[in-house]
Amino acid sequence: IDIKTLRGVTGGVTTIDPGYKNTGSCESAITFLNGEKGILRYRGYSIEDLAEKADFLEVAYLLIFGELPTQEQLDKFHGDIKKHSVVDDDVKKILDAFPKSAHPMGVLASLTSALTAFNPSSVNVESEEDMYNAIVRILGKFPVLVAWTMRKKQGLPLNYGSEDLGYVENILKMMFEKPNKEYQQSEILVNALDKLLILHADHEQNCSTSTVRIVGSSHAGLFASLSAGISALWGPLHGGANQAVLEMLEGIKEDGGDTKKYMGKAKDKEDPFRLMGFGHRVYKNFDPRARIIKKSADEVLGDLGVEDPILDIAKGLEKEALEDDYFVKRKLYPNVDFYSGIIYRAMGIPVEMFTVMFALGRLPGWIAQWREMRLRKEPIGRPRQVYIGENHRDFKTIENR
Ligand code: ACO
């Protein structure tokens, strides 16, 4: 049934579906997800293949434009991104005005929105060419904002990357380069970050992506839509879970490593504690990304020679949950963020930056979904409600209330 016919059939009927658990908001050709079977595909390619064989920029191209790029297409895309990676100097002043204690997600959302002021041509995009220009601009500038947000927190001078580096290599250089020290590229870190970013690159109509689509549906510009998506991602029930997981695991370690106690708390309905990094709206069997990340955590920590006791705590919690009725009955399994923070920490990324790294990975997905929505000329997103408030009331003057 097509959407116009459906509208005709339902007439004025409004369905209530809190959390949109059963509501499809759009038709999309970008990401396929089967929660029962644990399948995730970008444009038809399995997440396992992409994580193993592609790099992040190829995946970004695939998500946004629908096909894996030829070498020539990839070189042009990367060249255009590099051309637009300079951020206006005045953005540094805005960054400077934030207190050092500001959460990086708030800073990133603000800076992304601020970019509209310095790139007015990226606001009212109508043609595919306008869209392309806005897309390469944000793909160029966003990693700079990410790196600067981290450097500001660490009191490091702001920098730019190098023209001759790959997209992900350049991100790492911008993040980790220290003054008066020669920067050494680490293949281990490049591969680890490439994989993490690919695994986070899209996940169909999740909270932040739906936010990007709904803001973009009013024809607000790409950067404003992305800024809203970043805010949506920040919450601990969504992207903020990666920070929350690490803080939880750290807390369990400091409390003596008694995982059983925390399993009990998670099951206690009177206790607000939830096992962060567990459960997913769609995956009811396993999250294929979590499997890849768990393996990657072992490899990366091994390669870097890092021994982190919280990896054992995480594995212990997973094992107990798999054998626990409460978790089994509710089909609660580790999600993408249960192990990602352990890798980020081993890479030297501060905990408060974890959700920013998620945003960096999700950027091409948000862009692809926004572009698809605009090209399909979708209508403005505007859900209905069922009113449950007071009926008509006569106005009372203030002395009679
Ligand atoms: N720990 C303990 N119990 C849980 C957990 C958890 N992590 N997750 C869900 N449950 C329980 C709920 O209490 C509920 O129990 P009930 O049926 O007895 O009331 C049942 O499982 C179903 O959970 P809902 O909250 O209804 O599921 P929903 O689809 O609305 O929420 C969500 C999914 C938000 C991911 C939830 O599982 C959660 O809060 N997980 C922890 C936070 C997290 O890891 N978020 C990241 C998600 S992945 C991502 O965004 C990248």
Image (spheres, rainbow, N blue to C red):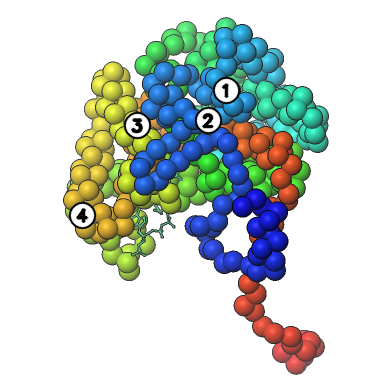
- Amino acid type at circle 3 is Ile
Where is residue 7, by image quadrant?
A: bottom right
Q: Label 3 vs label 4: CA separation? A: 23 Å
At x 27% / y 55%, what residue is drawn? 327
Where is residue 90, by image quadrant?
A: top right
- Relative image position of residue 174 (x, y in whole percent): 54, 19
Q: Quadrant of the C terminus?
A: bottom right
- Above or below residue 10? Residue 348 is above
Disc 2 vs disc 1: Cβ atoms closer than 8 Å? yes
Mark 2, ligand 1, within 8 Å: the answer is no
Disc on the earlier residue, 3 or 1? 1
The residue at which mark 4 appears reads as 324
Mark 4, ligand 1, within 8 Å: the answer is no
Q: Label 2 vs label 1: CA separation? A: 7 Å
Instruction: State the SS at label 1.
Output: loop
Q: Label 1 vs label 4: CA separation? A: 42 Å
